[in-house]
């Protein structure tokens, strides 16, 4: 396989990953509203959360591969950071959330709120969000640094700024839903950038 064809494949994979992340962002934005809702937590919420996190993991790996393609084809070292942090931080969020957000029955408010989340579990979940937010900031920096290597530098710059802001909100815990709404918009732009690169790559 030629270098150009391989590059198209990596950027196309990144575009698919960005699309997956837009779907995951919708789920995670709804879940992010949970601390503000006067609703009891349940296994249904837990399963929805895990679904969103699995999609985040898959999408993050694919997008990370696209950032790596900028290192491979344009010698942009920040692309390696995009891949490494994309894998590590999304895996950490999934693991911390699976452990920390597992609903325990018979909490202090039983039977009004039959499922209980321990403070330790919430701290674990927040640490996962903190790492994921850090990853988004790194992706934002990467998008800004590599913008001149893309077919759409202006859109890449806007994506980078949006990702940095989204990362800050995601890491805040109580405004996580705002961060994921911004991530949705950022990944729509990212998908356009990556897919345009896939089309134009020789």
Image: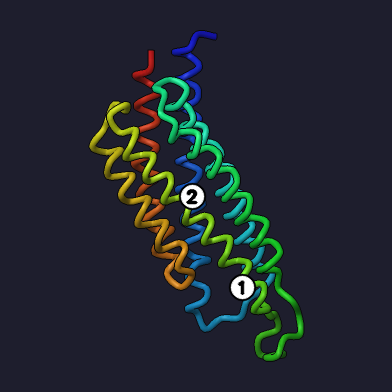
> Image point 39% across, 57% down: which residue?
166
Q: Quadrant of residue 105?
A: bottom right
Determine crowd level at label 1: few under 14, some 14-19, many 20+ residues with C-alpha closer than 10 A: some
Establish if 8 lies above or below 28: above
In which quadrant of the rendered image does the C terminus lie? Answer: top left
Would you name the residue on which mark 1 appears?
122
> Image point 42% across, 56% down: which residue?
167
- Relative to 13, is 147 on the left or the right? left
- Relative to 111, is 32 on the left or the right? left
**How much space separates mark 2 and mark 1, taking CA atoms?**
20 Å
Pointer 2 and pointer 1: residues touching (CB < 8 Å)?
no
> Image point 37% across, 50% down: which residue?
163
* Foreground of the two, 151 or 139: 139
Q: In which quarter of the image is residue 196?
A: top left
Q: How is the image coloured?
A: rainbow
Expressed as whole percent of the image width and height from the top left, the position of residue 126 reads 56, 67
Mark nearer the viewer, 2 or 1:
2
Q: In which quarter of the image is residue 76?
A: top left
* Foreground of the two, 30 or 66: 66
Expressed as whole percent of the image width and height from the top left, the position of residue 52 reads 57, 55
- Look at the numbered disc 2 and give the secondary structure of its residue: helix
Q: Who comes first in sequence, dot 2 or dot 1?
A: 1
Expressed as whole percent of the image width and height from the top left, the position of residue 41 reads 63, 76
Q: Please tell me the numbered disc located at residue 188.
A: none
Establish if 13 lies above or below 158: above
In which quadrant of the rendered image does the N terminus lie? Answer: top right
- Look at the numbered disc 1 and give the secondary structure of its residue: helix
* Foreground of the two, 145 or 35: 145
Number of marks in the image? 2
Q: Please tell me the numbered disc located at residue 135.
A: 2
Expressed as whole percent of the image width and height from the top left, the position of residue 31 reads 53, 66
> Image point 49% across, 37% down: which residue?
63
């Amino acid at each position: 396989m030629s270098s150009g064809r391989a590059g198209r494949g990596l950027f196309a994979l990144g575009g698919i990953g960005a699309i997956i992340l837009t779907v995951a962002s919708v789920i995670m934005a709804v879940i992010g509203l949970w601390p503000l809702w006067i609703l009891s937590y349940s296994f249904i919420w837990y399963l929805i959360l895990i679904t969103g996190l699995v999609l985040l993991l898959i999408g993050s790996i694919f997008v990370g591969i696209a950032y790596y393609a900028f290192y491979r084809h344009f010698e942009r070292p920040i692309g390696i950071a995009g891949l490494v942090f994309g894998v590590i931080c999304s895996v950490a969020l999934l693991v911390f959330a699976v452990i920390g957000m597992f609903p325990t029955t018979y909490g202090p408010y039983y039977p009004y709120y039959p499922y209980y989340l321990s403070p330790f579990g919430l701290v674990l979940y927040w640490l996962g969000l903190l790492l994921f937010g850090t990853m988004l900031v790194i992706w934002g920096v990467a998008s800004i640094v590599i913008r001149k290597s893309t077919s759409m530098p202006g859109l890449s710059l806007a994506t980078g700024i949006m990702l940095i802001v989204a990362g800050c909100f995601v890491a805040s815990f109580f405004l996580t839903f705002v961060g994921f709404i911004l991530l949705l918009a950022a990944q729509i732009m990212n998908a356009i950038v990556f897919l345009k690169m896939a089309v134009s790559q020789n």
